[in-house]
Image (cartoon, helix red, strand yellow):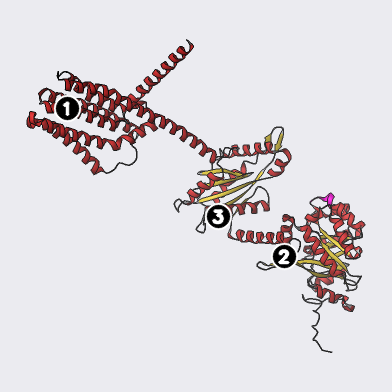
Amino acid sequence: MMLLSRFSRSSMITVETVRRGFRDSLSHDRSSVELLTEQYRSLRPLVPTMYLALFINVVFLAGASARSLGPAAFDLPVAVAVLVAARLAFWWLNGPQTGVPPVAAMRQSMWVTVGVATFAAIGLSLWSAHILATGDMAARAYVALFTALCTIACAACLSSLPLAAYCVIVGGTVPVSVALLMTGDVVLMSMGANLLLVAPLVSGMIYRQHRQLRRMMASRSVLAARKAQFRMLAYRDPLTGLANRRAFLDALSTAIRGPRSTSVAVGMIDLDGFKVINDTYGHRVGDALLSEAARRFEPLAMGDAMIARLGGDEFAVLLRDVESVGDAQSRLALVAGVFDRAFAVDAHKFRLSASIGLAHNGDDIGTTLDLVARADLAMYDAKRRGPGLIGVFEAGLEMRTRRRLTIEQALAAQAIEAPISLVYQPVIDAGSNRIVCFEALARWTHPTLGVVSPAEFIPLAEQAGVTQPMTTNLLSKALGDASAWPPGIGLSFNISAAELGSPTLADRILDLVAEHGFDPCRLSIEVTETALLGDFAAARTALSALQRGGVRILLDDFGAGYASIGYLREIQFDGIKLDGSLIASLTDSPAAHDLLVGVLQLCRAIGAPVTAEMVETAAQYDLLRALGVEKMQGFYLSRPLDADAAQYACDGDRVRAAPRPSSVVLFPRRPVRVPGAA
C-alpha cells in the first residue's frame, strides 16, 4: 500500500512537471531573457531553410496535381514562391544580421512568426484538402506525403519556438488527416490515421527538445552567476570590500591605453604606525583599522577615481581625468584627511597618518607597472621625510633611489669585508702644536657610483642592519694602524646611532682593544647628540661600560641644536667636540662669537676638554687659541691622511705641527726611495 502511495505521488509529480513544462513551452513571454535570446539565435538561421523546404514541397505538390487541376494548381505555389523569394532577397540584401535586438523586438518577432506559421499551415492544409476533393488518385496520394514532409520539416525548423511548431503540426496535419479519413479510400484513410498518430510524437519530440534547452539555459545561468561571483571575489579584497591589486592594475592598464588626452595619476598610500599597532594589539585590531579606513575612503568626492587595497596596510588610488599635478595632489589630500580623526577599536583609540606617493602619467611612461613603481618611490620618499606627507615623483628621485638601492645592495653583499677604507685626520694640541690624536674617518669609492660620503652610506647601513659587522671590521683595522703609532697619540672612532643601542657594543669594543694589545686609554669613542636620541638608557649603559674599561667617551657635534645640556648632566663625558656650525661664522658674526664663548664656559664648568672641528682659516685658528680651545682639527691644519701618511707624520719629530696659511695637507707624502740611491 505504501509503495502504491509513493508511486501515485511520484506519478502526480511527474504529470504536474510535464504539464507545467508544456505550459511554459507554449508562451515565450514566460522565458527569461537568456532563454529568449537563445531561442531567437537558434530560430533565426533556420527560418530560410524552412521557407526553402516549404517552397520545394509546394512546387512538387502543384506538379503532381496539375494534370487534374490544370494551371490553377500553380496559383498558390506562385504566390508562395513570390513571398519566399521576396523574404530571401530581403535577407540577402541586408546581409547577415549581427548582434541581438532588444528583448521587446525579439518577443514581437516571435509572435509574428507564430502568426505567419499558423496562417500558412491552415492555408496549405485547406489547399491540400481541396486537392483531395478534386484531384485524381495520384494527386490525392501525394497530398499525404506532402503533408508529412512539409509538417515535419517546418516543425523541426521551428523547434526553438514550440508554440509555432505546435501550430504548424495542428494546423497542417489535422485538417488534412480529417480530409483523408473522409475519402472512404482505405489507403488514404490509413495515411490520415498515420498522420494523426505521428503528429503527437513529433510534438513530444519538440517539447523534450525545448525542455532540454530550458535546462541547459538554467545551468548556464547558474554557471554565469557563479562566474560573476568568482570574478567579484577575484577582483575584491575580502577584508575591506575595496578593489584588490588585480582589479587596480587592470583598471590602470585600461586607463593608460585610453585617449592620449586623458591624464591619469596614481597615488600609493602606506599607513604610518600601523605595523606597531598590528604587532602590539594583534591582527584582529589591525584588520578593524584597515576596514574602518576603507569605509572612510568610500564617501570621498574624488571625481573619477578608484581606491584599492594592494595588501597589508598599502592602498592605491587611480585618478582619471587629472587636470594637473596640483589637481591630483588636492584630490589625494582628501585621502590624507580621513586620518585626522582617531580610530576607535574596542576600548582603544589610535592615531594614524598616511604617507602618500603621487605619480602622473607622461610621455615617458612605459607600462602600468612603471607608473605604480614611480608612485611607490614617491611614497617611500615621503615616508622618509616624515609621516603624513604627499610626495610627488620627479626624475631625480628615481636616480637617487637607484643610487640608494645600489649602495644598500653593496653594503649587504660585503658587510663583513666592505670596500670601505679609513683615513685619519690629525687632532692638534693648540698649546704645543703637536698631534695628540687621529680621528678615523670612513671613505668609500664605489666602482660605478664614485665617491660615497659617510653621510650617505652610514644611514643606509643602519637601515640595512649591517652596521655591526662594518663597525667591527673598521675599528679592527683602525686599531691595527694605531698600534704602530707612538704611545702618546690616540685614536678617535665614531659610533653610529644604530650601534649605540646594542647591548653587546661595549664587550665587542673592549675585546677588539684587547685583541690588538691597544691601550684602552688611547681610544676615544665619539657619539653624536642625535645618536643619543634613540634609546638613551641603553646608550648610557654601553658608554658607562666602556668608560669602566678605560675608553674615553667624547660628545661629538655639540651645539648642533639638540638638548645637549641634559646629556651633559646624565653622562660624564671625557671631552666635547664643537659642531662645525659654531666655528664657520666665528670671525664674521659677533653673535656667533658670543655664543661660542658661552658654550666654552659651559664646558669648562663641567670640566670637559674641548676640541674645535672644521678649523679652515688662520683667523679661526688664532681666535680659537685666544679663547682657550685646547684641541683643534680641520683643513687649515691638515686634510685626512691615509694610513701611510699618518704613520709618516708620527715618525720622529714630525709629530710636531705648525699651522699653515692654506688648506693643504700638513704632512707631505713620504719621499719615494730610488733603489740604490744613497
- Res 236 quadrant in image: top right
The residue that mark 1 highlights is 143
Q: Which of marks 3 and 2 is in front?
A: 3
Amino acid residing under circle 1: Val
Question: For residue 370, which numbered disc appears in the image?
Answer: 3
Residue at 90% x, 57% y is 547
> Horizontal and vertical percent for residue 597?
85, 62
Residue at 56% x, 53% y is 359
Q: What element carries label 1?
A: helix
Looking at marks 1 and 3 on the same chain, the residue that comes earlier in the sequence is marked by: 1
Give the camera-side residue of 247 and 668.
247
> Horizontal and vertical percent for residue 376?
60, 52
The residue that mark 2 highlights is 453
Give the camera-side residue of 251 and 124.
124
Give the camera-side residue of 504 and 4.
4
Q: How crowded is mark 2: few (under 14 residues within 10 Å), some or many (20 or more)?
A: few
- Residue 429 magenta: no
- Left or right: 180 as drawn, with respect to 575: left
Residue at 18% x, 20% y is 189
Distance between mark 3 and mark 2 Cα atoms? 30 Å
Distance between mark 1 and mark 2 Cα atoms? 106 Å
One can see residue 479 in this view: yes
Asked if the residue at tag 3 contacts the one at tag 1, i.e. Cβ–Cβ closer than 8 Å, the answer is no
* Magenta range: 534-538
Looking at marks 1 and 2 on the same chain, the residue that comes earlier in the sequence is marked by: 1
- Res 480 quadrant in image: bottom right
One can see residue 530 in this view: no
